[in-house]
Image (tube, rainbow, N blue to C red):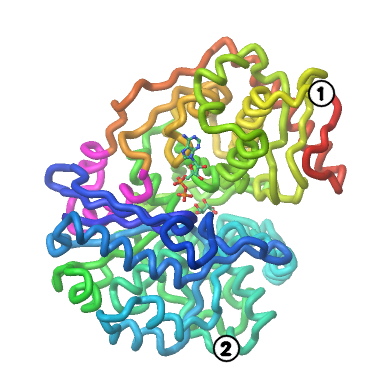
Amino acid sequence: MVLGLDVSTQSITALVMDPERGSIVDRESVSFGADLPQYQAPHGFIAGGAAGEVHADPRMWLDALDLIFARLGRSFDLSQVTMIAGSGQQHGSVYLDADFEARLASLDPAAGLAAQIAPSLTRRTSPIWMDTSTTAECREIAAAVGGDDELCRRSGSVAVERFTGPQIRRFWKGDGAGYAATRHMHLVSSFIASVLAGRSAPIDFGDAAGMNLLDLAAFEWDPRLVDATAPGLMEKMPPVMPTATVIGVISPYWVERHGCSAACRCAMFTGDNPASWIGMGAGRPGERVISLGTSDTLFAAIDEPRTDPQGFGHVFGNPAGGYLSLLCVRNGSLAREALRDRHELDWQAFDREALDRTRDAAGANLMLPFFGPEITPRGDVGGPILRGSAAFESGGRPDLEVRALLEGQFLNMRLHAQWMGPAAERILLTGGASANDGIAGIVADVFQAPVERLETGDSAALGAALLAAAAAGHDLGGLQAKCCRRDVGPRIEPDRSLAPVYDDALVRFRRLLEETRDMPGKTAGQSAAG
Ligand code: ADP
Ligand code: XUL
């Protein structure tokens, strides 16, 4: 048996897989908000951060790790697991001192992880991918290496606020002593892998590319980028390795506290998006994965590290080889939830039946679907901007707003994915909101491509389990063919008669975006009359 763990923004998911049969034999999850209310992070992060800061408490991830193993152990004999791999929300960073490895090696199984590892944290809380506080640091790093174009050419992305390099620089500037005491710089993925393996783990290609520190062509840390980020950083960086490399056997803590086998091995962890790519079994030409989680992401495989000329998209390492292009929209599920709550709706208002009732209004009303700061496109547009017919403006009809929000979200994605190449021929949809047929239907219509979904919505955890199996010697492609079944539920076909409607809406959406970005100071609920 192999175990895949996904440590996401709002939860941890664990899947136990029997790789011989290609079947999932157990599943558990821990929700940070609901299961660990003591951290006061209902969505997995600490609310109310100043100046764009969004942090999470790494002790919460550790408590969740103990809890998910305890839960798994109730329904499943954990001694049967021979390999563990995993994924983590990307970009988030954990800062640890020189005692970190000694602490990991001597964990007392009678006490939990959080209290024992916390004394090694040199930064009490971890900036996560939602953080937008590092604009100044982005500018400084880009300037030091000859500009954003050069940074993008080397690393696959321009300097990006949520990326780890700018976050490290901000820490160095704000807390020199804390930075100096830091011996190990980890991502969420490599931090959790370290805790399992009992030693500081390497960082994988997939996640390393989200740091503004990796030389994408060589798959090694780029000394120029590392030096431009903070002094002495290279000595703090773990090595970079291919995904699915085995790190070693699990540490005795897991054997004694949770009943794992002393022979169980740990493989490297990767980012949640690269893991999702594997878990969706994607890779055929023309395929795009869209993941509707806390963030909405769109990704596709590319052979060459081609970059986004506008600087919004990214290139990451593909765990299956080659590269992945990725687009991340911050206003994903949280924007859908904001509109739902504003009008006191439930998810049924986003379902097929409800959306069919507003079909006549397809593409008619535009909404810039940004309820908070956005990263694709970047900028604080300060609340959703509506533009549409008089009825839409004055009526405040929730059903029209739901359609406009979803259309706006997917027009925004379609617009910013154009650099990736020819239009999508097939979309594989995953993430929490993918279960919603109405949302899936709007994706198909806006992209004018059929949408397929998998049996499991847990594509990142499934990808992690598949990577664990690959690390144990199983053939990844063969396992994907067995496990990533798409014949579940009907494939959702686009309404082809709407092709010109959404082509036209795309042009108007781009114009609205450009006009709005020229008008600073928009506030929530403001409308731009059309
Ligand atoms: P993450 O991996 O980022 O923690 P998930 O992929 O688990 O996120 O997705 C969680 C989100 O899915 C929730 O925040 C919720 O808004 C959304 N969601 C769950 N069920 C539905 C539904 N039926 N319709 C729309 N959105 C949903
Ligand atoms: C990707 C990104 C998010 C996080 C959280 O660049 O920032 O998708 O990985 O899921």
Q: Which residue is mark 1?
A: 394
Q: Is residue 282 left or right of residue 514?
A: left
Nearer to me, 183 or 400: 400
Q: Please name the residue shown 17% across and 69% down the image.
A: 259
Image coordinates of residue 435 in percent, x first then y, are 42, 33
Nearer to me, 484 or 488: 488
Q: Please name the residue shown 21% across and 54% down the image.
A: 469
Quarter the N terminus occupies: bottom left
Q: Which residues are magenta?
A: 458-483
75 part of magenta stretch: no
Instruction: Give the total number of marks visible in the rendering.
Output: 2
The verdict on label 2 being within 8 Å of ligand 2 is no
Q: Please name the residue shown 17% across and 48% down the image.
A: 19
Q: Please name the residue shown 38% across and 49% down the image.
A: 460
Which amino acid type is shown beneath numbered disc 1?
Answer: Ser
Which amino acid type is shown beneath numbered disc 2?
Answer: Ala
Q: Main secondary structure of the magenta part?
A: helix
Residue 180: give its label. 2
The local secondary structure at tag 2 comes to helix
Using the image, determine if residue 499 lies above or below residue 256.
Answer: above
Quarter the C terminus occupies: top right
Image coordinates of residue 219 in percent, x first then y, are 44, 63
Image coordinates of residue 390 in percent, x first then y, are 82, 19
